[in-house]
Amino acid sequence: MELTTWYLEQTDAAQIRAGREPAEPVEIRRAEVPSPEFSRFLYTAVGGDWFWTDRLPWTWQQWHDWLAAPGVETWVAWVRGTPAGYIELDGRAPEEVEIAYFGLLPQFAGLGIGGHLLTEGLRRAWAQGSPTRRVWVHTCSLDGPAALANYRARGMTLYRTDVTPRTSTAETPGPWPGARDA
């Protein structure tokens, strides 16, 4: 099997194409206090079904150091007091912001929240610190089926595609050990 990775970017904030209004009210707020526990929850709840495994071995201190780094921001979508998804921005590099992670908890997919959250995340990325000249992201064939289409629909353009042999396991880790057995 092969793994396809797509790299997309925007080079001007005017390229943002807004997503539709969600089916119900959504509040998007920045998680301003570094909270490794909360961020790890978001990471596993959103990415557990999509092979997000690179941060699973991180210690509490690694999470904290990452979240406290200047230019790193976490924006969370809330529906009636419940976290529905998040977008993590990495603005540490000069003049560019990477969408490091983005996604929804499974029960919130298909309600227009993803397009809305990505639109707001892109706006926040363009508003970060020093002049931003580029916002970029990569997604792959192991990510959610709507990811690539959502990035494109929000005005991001493809600039590179890589195809490599797939070496990961066939089973996703799930949101926590044993969750699949429940």
Image (cartoon, helix red, strand yellow):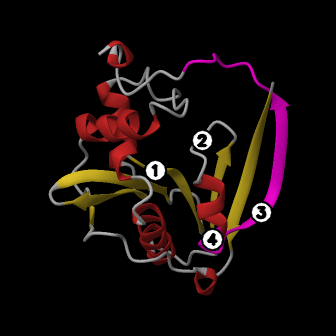
- Alpha-carbon distance for marks 1 and 4? 15 Å
Q: Amino acid at mark 4?
A: Ala
Q: Is label 3 or label 2 in front?
A: 2
First in residue order: circle 1 vs circle 2:
1
Q: CA distance from mark 1 to mark 3?
A: 19 Å
**Residue behind mark 1:** 103
Q: Is residue 51 visible?
A: yes
Q: Secondary structure at mark 4?
A: helix
Say which mark, if any, is on residue 143: 2
Q: Which residue is mark 4?
A: 153
Q: Is residue 26 above or below residue 84?
A: below
Vertical side of 87 occupied by 152: above or below: below
Q: CA distance from mark 4 to mark 2?
A: 17 Å
- The picture places residue 23, in percent across and down from the top left corner, at 33, 69
Question: Disc 3 or 4, which lies upstream in sequence?
Answer: 4
Q: Amino acid at mark 2?
A: Asp
Q: Nearer the viewer, residue 58 or 121?
A: 121
Q: Residues within 10 Å of mark 2 (few under 14, many from 20)?
A: some
Tell me if label 1 and label 2 are in contact, CB under 8 Å: yes
- The kind of secondary structure element at disc 2 is loop
Q: Quadrant of the C terminus?
A: top left
Q: Which residue is mark 3?
A: 158
* 3 and 2 marks in contact (CB < 8 Å): no
Compute the Cα span from label 3 to label 2: 16 Å
Q: Residue at x 83, y 43 (%)?
A: 162
Task: Please tell me in which quadrant of the rendered image residue 177 appears.
Answer: top left
Local packing at callout 3 (Cα closer than 10 Å; few below 14, some 14-19, many 20+) is some
Q: Tell me what residue is drawn at x 25 percent, y 46 percent.
A: 34
- Quick one: SS at disc 3? strand
Q: Amino acid at mark 3?
A: Leu
Q: Earlier in the sequence, mark 1 or mark 4?
A: 1
| Pair 3/4: label in front | 4
